[in-house]
Amino acid sequence: MIIKRYIVDNMSEAMTRIRYELGNDAVIVSQRKIRQKGFTGLFKPKKIEVTAAVDEKAQKDITPKKDDLEKEIQEIKNLISNMTQNTTQKSKTKTGETTRNKFKAHLISSGVPEEIAQEIIDTIKEKNIGKKINSKIYEKEFKSILDEIIKTNEFDNSRIHLFVGPTGVGKTTTIAKLASLNTLYKNKKVGLITVDTYRIGAVEQLKTYAEILGVPFGVIFSNNDIKKVLDDMTNCDIILVDTTGRNSKNAMQLQETKRLIQEINPDYIHLVISMTTKESDIKRIINDYRILNYNSLILTKIDETNTFGSMLTAIYYSNVPVAYMTVGQNVPDDIEIAKKDKIINMVVEAE
Ligand SMILES: Nc1nc2c(ncn2[C@@H]2O[C@H](COP(=O)(O)OP(=O)(O)OP(=O)(O)O)[C@@H](O)[C@H]2O)c(=O)[nH]1
Ligand SMILES: [Mg+2]
């Protein structure tokens, strides 16, 4: 029999110590309150003296075996190692998050709209699952995404080009530029048509350019005129068709234009968008005009603002190639064939 005496503050402390030292089979033999020794003991709270006893055989059983001890040490080691791993993992995640946020902020400050910046980052994350993405990788991946999404398109030998887009974006001016370039520098026979009968003066605007260049000019008032006007231009290498500027919110107007387009059956439908337009409006225009099945973009007024965000918005959401970019009011000089490298460089400059 082993008998032990404990001086404790309370019974709970006594039980813990007894269980630990003597095991579960120990029994409490006695307990009493005692005052602590010495003068100062008078002013201190009373303690409890607990006496416990256990059969020696039972006590032996609770002595941890060597194997058990080793096992316990191993478990503790594992626990500690897990804890350190977790902490490193957490700090890695944190570093990843910071790099990602920094890169996103960097894109936004370069003019990339927030929504596109987020989508670009998500794409980069998906492409690099399980890898640590540092800022160099972000830069590299971003360039390769730009390379993928920016498509350009030079006019080939396609004959009929039709231009659509909101009011005042520069459709007629762009047509005048292209008509001049093709007539004066490429020696092509150009024909000009307007279906812009909606706005007073619109016919005159294109007619004036046609007269200056000495090229045939036709007006389409309704679907019935289309065949005749096109037949008059059978000897033209390239026909440029101007349309009324439409408010893309007006679905009826767009439907009207759609019917005309179906009848004219152009090779290219160029959606002309001014880069001075708000990014959210560009996104809406891109979507509203989809019913016209445009297959090319012309970005205008690039000279007027810092346009990278608008350009990226138009290119990203339309998913069609850019044919031309216009950079001023001068006919015919202020127009450029869209070049992928140049657009990508604009981003780098923005950075
Ligand atoms: N700064 C600048 N102005 C331009 C550019 N392209 C056109 N413009 C000007 O934008 C204004 C409208 O051009 P238009 O060609 O008449 O526009 P539109 O799209 O035909 O307009 P609607 O026929 O009314 O739909 C004119 O004053 C042009 O000189 C450009 O690239 N840069
Ligand atoms: Mg016009």
Image (cartoon, helix red, strand yellow):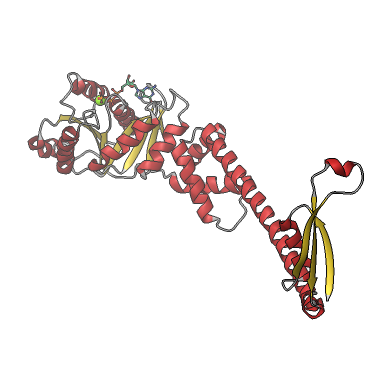
In percent of width and height, residue 19 lies at 74, 67
- Quadrant containing the N terminus in the rendered view: bottom right
Instruction: Out of 245 and 154, give the one closest to the viewer.
Output: 245
Q: Is residue 301 above or below residue 138?
A: above
For the point 84% across and 70% down, the residue is 3
In percent of width and height, residue 208 lies at 23, 20
For the point 66% across and 49% down, the residue is 91
In this view, which residue lies farthest toward the bottom? Answer: 57
Ligand 2 placement by image quarter: top left
Q: Is residue 10 above or below residue 335?
A: below
Quadrant in which residue 198 is drawn: top left
- Quadrant containing the C terminus in the rendered view: top right
In percent of width and height, residue 326 lies at 39, 29
For the point 43% across and 28% down, the residue is 302
Taking the image as drawn, is residue 35 in sight? yes
Instruction: Out of 98 and 252, give the one closest to the viewer.
Output: 98
| For residue 326, side relative to residue 240 (left or right) | right
Taking the image as drawn, is residue 185 in sight? no
In percent of width and height, residue 39 lies at 91, 42
